[in-house]
Image: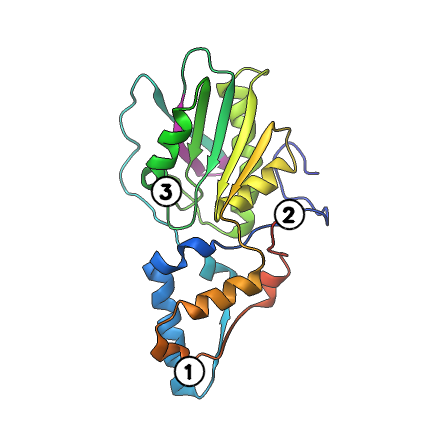
Amino acid sequence: PSGSDGSASSDPSITLVAFESTEVARVRPSLHRFRIAAALSLLLGGCTFRVAQDSFLFPQPSPTPPESEIPSRRNVEIPVAQGVALRGWFFSKPGARRTFLFFYGNAQTVMKSTKAQAWLAEQPESNLLAVDYRGYGFSSGQPSLEVIAQDGPRIYDFLTTKLIPADHEVIIVGYSLGNIVAIHTAARRPVGRVILLAPPTDVEEVMELSRQRLPWYYRMWVGKIVAEPELIKLRPRPV
């Protein structure tokens, strides 16, 4: 287990989810990258496209500040490193006994995941905290799989020390890419329940799915999409 700062653990039983299989089809930047790689493979006579860790992340930074507060929703800011702050929303209601900690999917932001937040916030006797990852939405900093995972316990600590009473149940909800943060946080902090939505099985499956999502005329020349060793060593498969 890590220290109180939420740094990554070397515990071999902890695994990370590396990518979101459900969003490949609609994330245009990722498809554009694969198309370019396929064209280069044809020109260079190759047929294998290697995917590095940064190819999995599609930050959606927002130049606008968080929206004005309303009685049930307040803006939050969580310092996580020198000059880096995570920003998002905390929804609260009188008499709440539990709080959902929600981690959204890739190419999303707090602003772009409002439907899921609204559903969770409407649950009886429940609060909700949703925060943008580094480099996403309202938050500053540069994202990577490691720092996104490491920030999860920091967000949890802010929630439990600044926003809710000690006897509140914390329910972590991860969607797609957010399963990285959900699993990492739940393995290092006490939680009531963990809900994982749309986690992939392993990185090899994600690579093949990515190839299948390419147009047929690119698949003719891209025989295989494989992960770089730096990605494989993260052991990106769900618990």
The tag earlier along the polypeptide, 2 or 1, is 1
Q: Is mark 1 on a helix, strand or loop?
A: loop
| Residue 88 as seen in the image, left or right of residue 162 | left
Type of amino acid under label 1: Trp
Which residue is at a point 47% across and 85% down the rendered structure image?
46
Q: Which is nearer the N-term, disc 2 or disc 3? A: 3
Q: Name the residue under label 1.
A: 221
Q: Is residue 100 above or below residue 107?
A: above
- Is residue 159 on the magenta stretch? no
Position of residue 3 in the picture relative to residue 77 (left or right): right
Residue 215 located left or right of residue 129: left
Residue plotted at (43% across, 54% down): 22
Q: Residue 12, position in %: x, y?
A: 73, 50
* Image point (54%, 29%), residue name: 171
Asked whether residue 52 appears in the rendered view, the answer is no
Quadrant of the image occupied by residue 113 = top left
The image position of residue 25, as x and y in percent, is: 37, 60
Quickly name the residue at label 3.
Answer: 109
The range drawn in magenta is: 80-91
- In terms of depth relative to the viewer, which is nearer, 89 or 144? 89
| Label 2, residues with CA under 10 Å away: few <14, some 14-19, many ≥20 | few
* Marks 2 & 1, CB-CB < 8 Å contact: no
Q: Name the residue under label 2.
A: 239
Q: Locate the N terminus by quadrant.
A: top right
Q: Is residue 87 magenta?
A: yes
Disc 1 crowd rating (10 Å Cα; few below 14, some 14-19, many 20+) is some
Q: Which of marks 3 and 1 is in front?
A: 1
Question: SS at mark 3?
Answer: loop
Q: Is 225 placed above or below 155 here? A: below
